[in-house]
Image: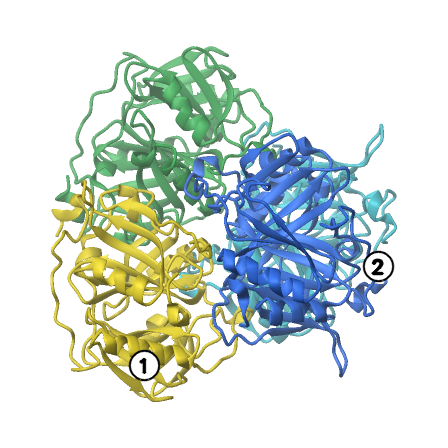
Chain colours: A blue, B cyan, C green, D yellow
Amino acid sequence: MGPGFDIVKAGHIEFLVTNLREARRFYVDTLGFVVTESDKSHVYLRGLEDRQHHCLTLTQSDSPGVGHFAFRVATEEGLKAIEKLAKSKGIYTRWVEANQERGQGRALLVEDMFGFPVEFYSKMAQEEWMLQKFQNYTVAKVMRLDHFNIMLPDAATAYAWYVKDLGFGCTEVTETEGPRPDLWAAWLRRKHTCHDIALTTGKGPRVHHAGFTVSDRGSIMDAADLLASSGYLKSMERGPGRHGVSNAFFLYLRDPDGNRIELYTGDYISADPDWIPIRWKLNDPQRQTFWGAPTPASWFNDAMLVRSPRTRRFASLTAPKIKDRPDYLLSAR
Amino acid sequence: MGPGFDIVKAGHIEFLVTNLREARRFYVDTLGFVVTESDKSHVYLRGLEDRQHHCLTLTQSDSPGVGHFAFRVATEEGLKAIEKLAKSKGIYTRWVEANQERGQGRALLVEDMFGFPVEFYSKMAQEEWMLQKFQNYTVAKVMRLDHFNIMLPDAATAYAWYVKDLGFGCTEVTETEGPRPDLWAAWLRRKHTCHDIALTTGKGPRVHHAGFTVSDRGSIMDAADLLASSGYLKSMERGPGRHGVSNAFFLYLRDPDGNRIELYTGDYISADPDWIPIRWKLNDPQRQTFWGAPTPASWFNDAMLVRSPRTRRFASLTAPKIKDRPDYLLSAR
Amino acid sequence: MGPGFDIVKAGHIEFLVTNLREARRFYVDTLGFVVTESDKSHVYLRGLEDRQHHCLTLTQSDSPGVGHFAFRVATEEGLKAIEKLAKSKGIYTRWVEANQERGQGRALLVEDMFGFPVEFYSKMAQEEWMLQKFQNYTVAKVMRLDHFNIMLPDAATAYAWYVKDLGFGCTEVTETEGPRPDLWAAWLRRKHTCHDIALTTGKGPRVHHAGFTVSDRGSIMDAADLLASSGYLKSMERGPGRHGVSNAFFLYLRDPDGNRIELYTGDYISADPDWIPIRWKLNDPQRQTFWGAPTPASWFNDAMLVRSPRTRRFASLTAPKIKDRPDYLLSAR
Amino acid sequence: MGPGFDIVKAGHIEFLVTNLREARRFYVDTLGFVVTESDKSHVYLRGLEDRQHHCLTLTQSDSPGVGHFAFRVATEEGLKAIEKLAKSKGIYTRWVEANQERGQGRALLVEDMFGFPVEFYSKMAQEEWMLQKFQNYTVAKVMRLDHFNIMLPDAATAYAWYVKDLGFGCTEVTETEGPRPDLWAAWLRRKHTCHDIALTTGKGPRVHHAGFTVSDRGSIMDAADLLASSGYLKSMERGPGRHGVSNAFFLYLRDPDGNRIELYTGDYISADPDWIPIRWKLNDPQRQTFWGAPTPASWFNDAMLVRSPRTRRFASLTAPKIKDRPDYLLSAR
């Protein structure tokens, strides 16, 4: 699976929100994320299965988007090896001191060649395990962060970076039609699930969504009931349904700022080292939704801006050279 | 609840199909309906919970539609009383001799004032209960017929016939907006569930769908998986989702001829005699789908023609005087 | 189905509890029953699906047991007809004035020939429907009262009273083995489910349990998780499992006073008037638990004492003349 | 996590069965394992999620038991490194030639110091993925092999071998009571789940069970229904229930020969390298079954004999020096 630097898994993501109280009502009071700690401008959240300090940080900000997303690395040596690799590629790097981000050890913050703010960290404080504290569950049962889905103009180059340089395995791909298909999307993993990160073709750099695992498909429907009766009807952008890619059940939500998360459950274990990627065609109607329900245009149009670690401003966007959605949705653009 | 003539429940429905073999592959091989018996031009089906000969008859025919739908009545005296009532209203009636429809005793066939072919019967042969023969289940787990949903231009007059003359109770209604709302739809019951028949405003007389109860919401999703991988992707017209009206989970299917059924589960017990109808506004986005997902235009456009017991031809259609769908869907007509 | 007096359904039950606060923590804070109102010595509870004032009353008392259980009757005339019938049988009757039991109209309280305190009522205040207020659900999802299960020495005589005199239908029976089997238990219904009351052979008069319907089998397991992590591990007496009789999923609980309830879901609709009772043999290992798990001895030994409406004291007990449990459990007595 | 030799996961297990036809009816016709291939004396099975040739082999034999269990290793070099390690410990090793076990590359067969026949392999033929062929699912939905559970007199020594020498991570442990607790059981993993192998104190070497992942907790109950109505009532030894350890839902089955499998679902992802083992006390009533249901004595008494790769005879048994079950079950021995 390539070098790997012992990258372990998708670790956490920072969402920028314009109203911390409203965001807290959505993520904590309704979806049941567990608050590890909070201050005036941050809320650090974890899932019911998490033993680590946070997998989602809400940061008070002037406009929504993503501050950074982060991969956990097994050792501090791994961080240094990534720094070396990054520098060899001319990528911007910066060390984030321990506890600058609450509960986290020294971390390497990178702006990769695609413009994404990516953090690598190896140490994080351990917290109480809520897994069997069922008395604290809400019906949505958010267990843990599962993956990031990012959108960028050139998926093929990003694929090379993640697979060849960073050592991710590829579980599934989507290709365009025709005799010389382009890589349109790829699902890549370090931990033994379908993915830690998905690369999708589109205007970018943007983060399309962060996927959080829920207990089972019943939780997906319970969450839909809960959201629909808690004033979040419009938050439900797509689903519930089953994916073709990943085979998982899903419900896509927009938080009060429009940031997008996926409630996700039911993919597979991908530990085998000789895994041959499952191949999908972009226009296959069962690729996105196995049951055939159409995807709303907003799902292709909207994604979260990312804040540059260098400039502290949102990265400007570039359009892809190939189409950014299936043919049957091109008219809905 | 009015006179009632001891009408017991929605009993069975006859679907006209153009290819009995294809229909059988859909209903039996895939959805797991139990075959009680069959001949060259009919297949008599029941659900896993049914103890009666059939709740769905497939009849080979030149074009699709509904031959008749039928209510079970507690006694033969009830049938005669309905005959008397029908004659007093000038409604066409005819006796169907015992076993002319397999497994059924003498029955009264009516063409009601709205043009629907409705059968009333009191005796039906009992069959083996498959409820605990789990070795024969498919994953769709169709338990029994639950209700009919019919579409007609004048729901208010049909409401009076069913509630005042036939003694149905009303559990829920949909009304148009405005200071003088029209009755747009009504859910009526004899058995102690949400409904045995729903009356919906639209071009009619047509049968919109027959609803069959499945085991639980997991069965709805299992059925979607099964259909999607059995060549019936296009059969899934709407859902899975949860209804506002009835609170049930649903998946609407079109059989190979376009006849429509609903897989349905999770409504409530309505035994209380002082039940006050739940009132919905037509334009409430949660009325049809509690989670807010839009309903496809075909759901409002398409319904099944009904064959006249008198002329043996399909009833001609009349358009309603009020709108036949919510305002937000009028553009999709 | 016999006369019926329009008995509608099992309506409510009064549990005597020695510590109202503890009982409330169990029923309300944990299981999620909805409080309609309460005073110093009573808490009136309903389920998420209930539209009526209460289906369970907790009454502060010196010792646990059952104050009374009640059937809803369609009309006031029905109450009078039952009074007349009761008097003709020499049964003690008394009128309970309107609102003496909160939310309830004038009711007839009876001590039947078996010693049970049974109330018949026709009017009850209507309350807000919580069915689609999912934001208030706990994971246990208790929807409504379903049935009473009573234990008495002579099931056959009670069967005659309920079926012939009160007009209940019989859905299932259990008989002893041998050429001349005794009726050991019967499941009787007015509403269209498996039962409103079950009669079981045992030392009596006692109430074995009250059954409350939960949303689906997932709710049964969620409730088990919740109870196990809320300090109620010992409350779970039997289950989760599936019954042979009724086909329902179950979990039997003892409240802090030892009063027993069943969380119950997944039986069938029994509307057909020609329903032939399903017959089980007492020693069939799948009768009680379809999956074969043994029933604990306490389930046969323990039941709730009933308070006499006449004497205000608990009814004294009589042992049955036939065995009170399957042979394979006789040694565990 | 120690050296690891890139051990990937629990790979497959060979069950010895005395009647291949009966075994096939249980595993294939009922539980829905997929047959990859078979010959006169073997059936090679995989789960619905498996992409590899087999995870369970049934081998016709004179008496039941386990032929061997096997771990997948990432590379051939890994196999050689394990051979070297084994030889340094004086452990018996033998190479199994490619395709001697169908579909498998060259493999190293070991008799470890505890007497277990353990195979290490790195290559296996890939097969059609049935994951989204829902039309072939039975209701039990067996997805893949998850883990082995082995019983041996000295869990602490085996812990050292697996963790220090073979590089497994430890997710949970059970210890005896008292000031100087003994290690009683350990759950060890290479793939990112709760475990690939569990070590339990008892008479050994024996294999207690092989655990197979099913789709979700509904599948556990569907499987129970299916088995109960397919003549396998007595096959269900324990469950359904939820474990304390692993947090998973379970159902333990005995095949027609008494070999034991677990249907298992709902544990967690354990990718974090700093995972601190969850600690349980042997006498904690929620350790085995979170809901408190007692474990039958057979669960502690019975386990599968293992066939020595050297002598081809079943390994003789040694009793442990510490108790082999919780105190509350000692009387049931």
The secondary structure type at the circle numbered 1 is strand
Whether residue B314 appears in this view of the structure is yes
The secondary structure type at the circle numbered 2 is loop
Where residue C23 sits in the image (x, y, percent)?
A: 38, 23
Q: Is residue C54 above or below residue B246?
A: above
Residue lying at 22% horizontally and 58% vertically, measured from the top left: D155
Whether residue A291 appears in this view of the structure is no
Q: Which residue is mark 2?
A: A332
Q: Is residue C83 above or below residue D263?
A: above
Looking at the image, which is closer to me, C270 or B194? B194
When asked about the image quadrant of residue D8, the answer is bottom left
Q: State which mark lies toward you, 1 or 2.
A: 1
Where residue A12 sits in the image (x, y, percent)?
A: 58, 49
Looking at the image, which is closer to me, D129 or C31? D129
At label 2, the amino acid type is Ala
When asked about the image quadrant of residue D180, the answer is top left
- The disc at residue D108 is 1
On screen, residue A309 versus residue C122, left or right, reads right
Residue lying at 75% horizontally and 41% vertically, measured from the top left: B285
Q: Are discs 1 and 2 both within one chain?
A: no
- Local crowd size for mark 1, using a 10 Å CA cut-off: few (<14), some (14–19), many (≥20): many
Where residue B307 sits in the image (x, y, percent)?
A: 74, 61
On screen, residue A162 versus residue C4, left or right, reads right
Q: Quadrant of the C terminus of chain C?
A: top left
Q: Is residue A210 above or below residue A267?
A: above
Q: Are marks 1 and 2 in contact (CB under 8 Å)?
A: no
Pointer 2 chain: A
Looking at the image, which is closer to me, C15 or B32? C15
Looking at the image, which is closer to me, D322 or C200? D322
